[in-house]
Each structure stands twice: as structure tokens, then as C-alpha cells.
Image: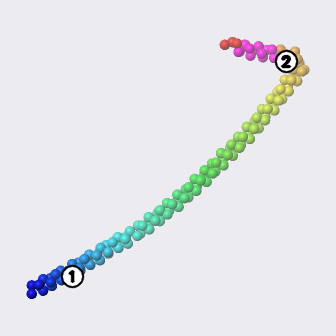
Amino acid sequence: MDQQHTEAIMSDAATKVGDTVGDLAARSEKVVQDKIDRAKPVLRDLQESAGAVLDRATELAQKASSAGALAIDAVQGAARDVANQTSQAAATVYQQGARAGGSVSRFATEQPLTALLVAAAIGYGAAYLVHRS
């Protein structure tokens, strides 16, 4: 009878352990499921926030690219304007130099003695400045 009694106790103990493990597993599953259910909205919010941040970053990158392109266009336009103005200034200086040379030639032809005296005075002044030091 002792053996049957021991087996009955062992059977009851195994049943209780099985029930306890089953309850523990069910509770653990419920706790884990609750944690997952609570984490889902947070994850959705994070996904939405990440999407919004990505959209904003894309928008800013496009604006920066547009601003860079506008700046490049502005600099190129300014460079073209400066080149045109420089070309016009050079042409003007060349024309004025040609007119001055024509005036000097005409003056030397019309007044050779005066032109010779002016040239001598300029030469003397230049020699004085060079040899003074």
C-alpha cells in the first residue's frame, strides 16, 4: 500500500507541477503579449516620426540643392557681366589711346618745333627722375 500511496502522491505532484507550469506559461504569454500590444503604438509612432523626419530631410536637401543652383547661376551671371564690362572698358581704352596717338601725330605734323621741345622736356624730366637716386 505504501507504493500505491507514493505513486498517487507523485501523480498528484506531477499534475500540480504541470498545472503550475501551464499557468506560468499562460501568464508569461499574456505578459509578453501585453508588452507587445503596448509597444505597437510606440513603434508606429516611431515609424511615423522617422518617415516625417525623412520627408523633411528630403525637402531640405531639395531646397539646398535649389539654392545652390540659384547661387551658381547668379555667380555665372555676375561673371558674364564682369567679362562684358571688362571687354567694353578695354575697347574704350584702346579707342582713346588710338585717338590720343592720332592727336599727337597731328600735333607733331602741324607744330614740329613745339613737339620737339615738348619731347625734349619729357625726356629730360624722365632722365632726371631715373638718375636722381
> Based on the displayed image, in which of its 4 quarters is residue 75 positioned?
top right
For mark 2, does the 10 Å Cα neighbourhood hold few (<14), some (14 to 19), or many (20 or more) residues?
A: some
Please, is residue 3 above or below residue 101 in the view?
below
Q: Amino acid at mark 1?
A: Thr
Q: Determine if the magenta segment contains residue 91.
A: no
> Magenta span: helix, strand or loop, mainly?
helix
Residue occupying the point 23% across, 78% down = 20
Which amino acid, mark 2? Answer: Ala
- Residue 62 in the figure: left or right of residue 111: left
Q: Which residues are magenta?
A: 119-130
Q: Is residue 125 magenta?
A: yes
What is the quadrant of residue 127 in the picture?
top right
| Residue tagged 2 | 115
Vertical arrangement, residue 119 with respect to residue 87, above or below: above
**Label 1 vs label 2, nearer the camera:** 1
Q: Earlier in the sequence, mark 1 or mark 2?
A: 1
Where in the figure is residue 22, as x and y percent of width and height?
26, 78
Left or right: residue 50 compared with residue 39: right
Q: Secondary structure at mark 2?
A: helix
Taking the spot 49% from the left edge, 60% from the top edge, the residue there is: 53
Q: Secondary structure at mark 1?
A: helix
Question: Residue 126, percent across and down?
Answer: 74, 16
Residue 24 coordinates in the image, percent (x, y): 26, 75
| Left or right: 9 as drawn, with respect to 26 | left
In 3D space, how far apart are the residues under numbered discs 1 and 2 (Cα atoms)?
135 Å
Mark 1, residue position: 15
Question: Which residue is painted at 87% across and 20% down in the image?
Answer: 108
